Amino acid sequence: MADKLNFDLVAPEARVFQGEVDMVVVPGSEGDFGVLAGHAPFMSTIRSGAIAIHDGADVRRTFIHGGFAEVTPAGLTILAEEAIDIADVDPAEVERQLTEAREDLGQARDEDETREAKNRIEKFEALLQTIAH
């Protein structure tokens, strides 16, 4: 039997996933990367996108926004600012939130409001792209 990867996905609200899997593909800030059992240790920030959790023939996809991934000899841990089960996403609601974020950007009064609106736009655009695939 092949070695399994110990994987933890944690968001501020709760531990989203914990278990042993075959592989996890992560949207790193420098590009997607796959992690298998025995992977060399490293850390990476993550960009908004879907992680793919492979276990046998099953692939579970979860959208993550912000955070970082750490690979250690013990496994992979992702600490995400937000994690959303793709099956729970309503595309019409995401489109509405994207429109609202774009309006907020146009009405931003300072750098903080501009940065927040851009962050939301990035998140909602990445989420729409994720559910389209």
Image (spheres, rainbow, N blue to C red):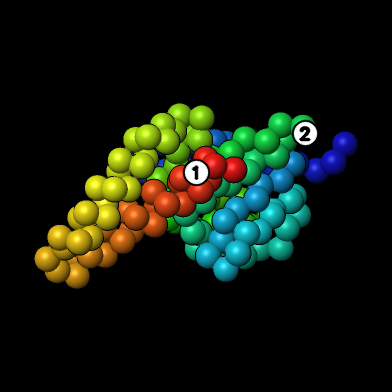
User: Can residue 21 be seen in the rendering of this structure?
Assistant: no
Name the amino acid, label 2.
Gly
Which quadrant of the figure contains the C terminus? top right
| Residue 60 located left or right of residue 104 | right
User: Can residue 4 be seen in the rendering of this structure?
Assistant: yes
Q: Is the residue 115 above or below the residue 95 in the image?
A: below
**Of 133 and 38, the residue lying toward us:** 133
Q: Residues within 10 Å of mark 1 (few under 14, many from 20)?
A: many
Q: Could you say which disc has been placed on residue 63 in the image?
A: 1
Foreground mark, 2 or 1, reads: 1
Name the amino acid, label 1.
Phe
**Of 102 and 73, the residue lying toward us:** 102
Measuring from the top left, give residue 75's x and y in whole percent.
65, 50
Which quadrant of the figure contains the N terminus? top right
Q: Earlier in the sequence, mark 2 or mark 1?
A: 2
**Residue placed at 57% from the left, 68% from the top?**
30
**Of 53 and 133, the residue lying toward us:** 133
Q: Residue at the right extreme? A: 1
The residue identified by callout 2 is: 56
Report helix, strand or loop for mark 2: loop
How far is the residue under mark 2 from the one under mark 1? 20 Å
**Residue placed at 57% from the left, 56% from the top?**
27
Q: Is the residue 12 above or below the residue 103 in the image?
A: above
**Residue placed at 51% from the left, 48% from the top?**
129
Q: Residues within 10 Å of mark 2 (few under 14, many from 20)?
A: few
| Residue 1 located left or right of residue 122 | right
How many tags in the picture?
Answer: 2
Measuring from the top left, give residue 117's x and y in whole percent.
26, 58
**Of 31 and 9, the residue lying toward us:** 31
**Residue placed at 77% from the left, 33% from the top?**
56
